[in-house]
Image (cartoon, rainbow, N blue to C red):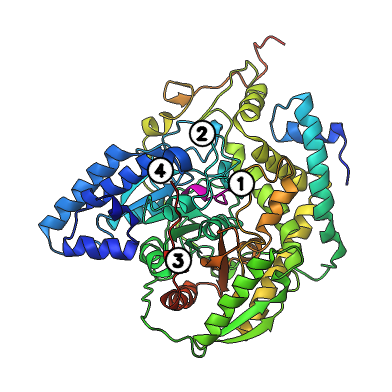
Amino acid sequence: MSDLSSLSVTAALIGLARGDFTSRDLTHACLAAILKHDPELRCFLAAEPEMALAAADAADARRRKGGDLPPLLGLPIAVKDVLAVEGMTATAGSRILSGFQPPYTATAVRRLLDAGVVILGKTNTDEFAMGSSTENSAFFTTHNPWNTERVPGGSSGGSAAAVAARLTPAALGSDTGGSVRQPASFCGVTGLKPTYGRVSRYGLIAYGSSLDTVGVLARGAEDVTALFNVMAGHDPLDATSADRPAPDVRLSAGATLKGLRVGVPEEYFIEGIQPEVEERVRAAIEELKTLGATVQPVNLPHTKYALPVYYLIAPAEASANLARFDGVRYGLRVENEDVIEMFKDTRGAGFGPEVIRRIMLGTYALSAGYYDAYYGQAQKVRTLIARDFLAAFEQVDVIAAPVAPTTAFKIGGHGDDPLAMYLEDVFTLPANLAGVPGLAFPVGFDAAGLPVGMQLMGRHFEEETLLQVAHAYQQTTDWHTRVPEHK
Amino acid sequence: MSLTREDVQHIAHLARLTLTEEELERYREQLSSILEHVARLQELDTTDVPPYSGALAAAMPLRPDEPGKTLPTQTLLRAAPDTAADQFRVPPILDEGRDE
């Protein structure tokens, strides 16, 4: 049964529908793979075998009853531990939420549960999704299944590594500055960051509220599509959720890309980029041409300002969002007779260094006398970055670029240098700042055998175009089907 | 942009964070170098540029302000570190009767 855990979403759904195996068989195979490989990879903060098997049995009973069946009935998935699932702890990778039991379920997860999924457990993340490697998790670092001395990327590193290692067919992530796309790239899987507002943020532990999105990681574009169709759509519980009809993306087989205009921004092929990353991405762009697309250069002139803009706006929003962790309503409390000192001691003890850094940076950027120079100016430059995209999308339908400047780096490789870590996000931040969708997918390997990813960015609410292009590419290439030989 | 130790202490107070001496110094160095990096935004003239208001700002709908269903008090209190009489319990907030 153990090879059932290697099935893609698409193959698993076909097998379940045909009765080749039950959800219990499939879920059991995933749990067995987790038991076998996770002690080394450490993708999961908490696997939930009992709940998963009970849900699988319920899905099998539902199927036996027959009639109209929900679209993902019996499909096992993993959930990044920044999303609330009633009955499971939600830590956001932080000691301040250690053992926290959320009293409700995130809308994106709720919709997947209503569609029949089985949740295997919660995956590791950088604390409060702040990081690019899972090294900022308060609990442990996840290892990249392609080379266990390497990071899986982050912050959705647990989800990406679990999909890559065939512990689950799919996993949820969140993407505030690249946290779905960069780990997808580092682990050789496909990861979608939807348009801002496309998927409800209700039940997502907030980091940067104007940037946060809930995304999906899976083997290929059609696997991602199966979950995206279910998760997305308007939700009255999230005031920033877009009031648009739910997507119904249908990928066509054997699609040609005739008529598609692909833009290549030279600002994304900067000095310092690993030569093999540039080579593989340019080769993938050539492949899109072979499939019928036209390719032209575009300019995104304010790209170099995305990093400073992001590292003012995201920390500013984080400093406000994380004010709620004060030892009163949930999570850790460090007792002190003085209430202000209780807040301070609780937060000083409960937050890790990267979270403290960003809270302090954001507090400073918003403080009296500095607001206009830092936060105010960043919000104006954010407008310029968003305008860059609007202008580019007048000329082209999608923008193709690398996901990250390098392949997966060594665990501990960035030492104690926060800026070096921030530079990992340089190509993924702009899509969050502009609110546009982004899709990362594997386009080859470097000489060390580590996956290289390419990202496509598209117009607001045009996830379908991105998924269709990646699907066409994945029908003529097999990078997304490669399996790491983790021991 | 180089922060002083007093700057960092002030920020930590505003952010309600207890930090050790060693942490204060480390964050002073790291925040100074990050602020130096973000200072490059100042080179752009943004006189006529409005602050970003979101891709969806124009479509931001209004809804009727009606009370909806909320979670029961007991459910919400379950995760709290300390409760009493259906409320969150905290150390005294007013000075009255407090030992200074």
Amino acid at the residue labelled 1: Met
* Callouts 3 and 4 close, C-beta under 8 Å: no
**Separation of marks 3 and 4 at Cα, in angstroms:** 20 Å
**Mark 3 or 1: the one toward you:** 3
**How far across and how far down the image is residue A27, in percent?**
27, 48
**Separation of marks 2 and 1 at Cα, in angstroms:** 15 Å
**Separation of marks 4 and 2 at Cα, in angstroms:** 26 Å
Using the image, determine if residue A251 lies above or below residue A50: below
**Separation of marks 1 and 4 at Cα, in angstroms:** 26 Å
Amino acid at the residue labelled 4: His
**How far across and how far down the image is residue A292, in percent?**
51, 89
* Callouts 3 and 1 close, C-beta under 8 Å: no
**How far across and how far down the image is residue A390, in percent?**
64, 77
Residue at (73% x, 42% y) in the render: A363
Precedes in sequence: disc 3 or disc 4: 4
**Separation of marks 3 and 2 at Cα, in angstroms:** 35 Å
Q: Which residue is mark 3?
A: A480
Q: Which residue is mark 4?
A: A37
Precedes in sequence: disc 3 or disc 2: 2
Q: Which residue is mark 2?
A: A97
Residue at (58% x, 55% y) in the render: A176
**Mark 2 or 1: the one toward you:** 1
Q: Which residue is mark 1?
A: A130
The image quadrant where one finds the C terminus of chain B is: top right
Q: Are marks 1 and 4 on the same chain?
A: yes
**The residue tagged with tag 3: helix, strand or loop?**
helix
Question: What is the magenta range?
Answer: A150-158
Nearest the camera: A32 or A419?
Answer: A32
**Separation of marks 3 and 1 at Cα, in angstroms:** 27 Å
Protein chain holding label 3: A
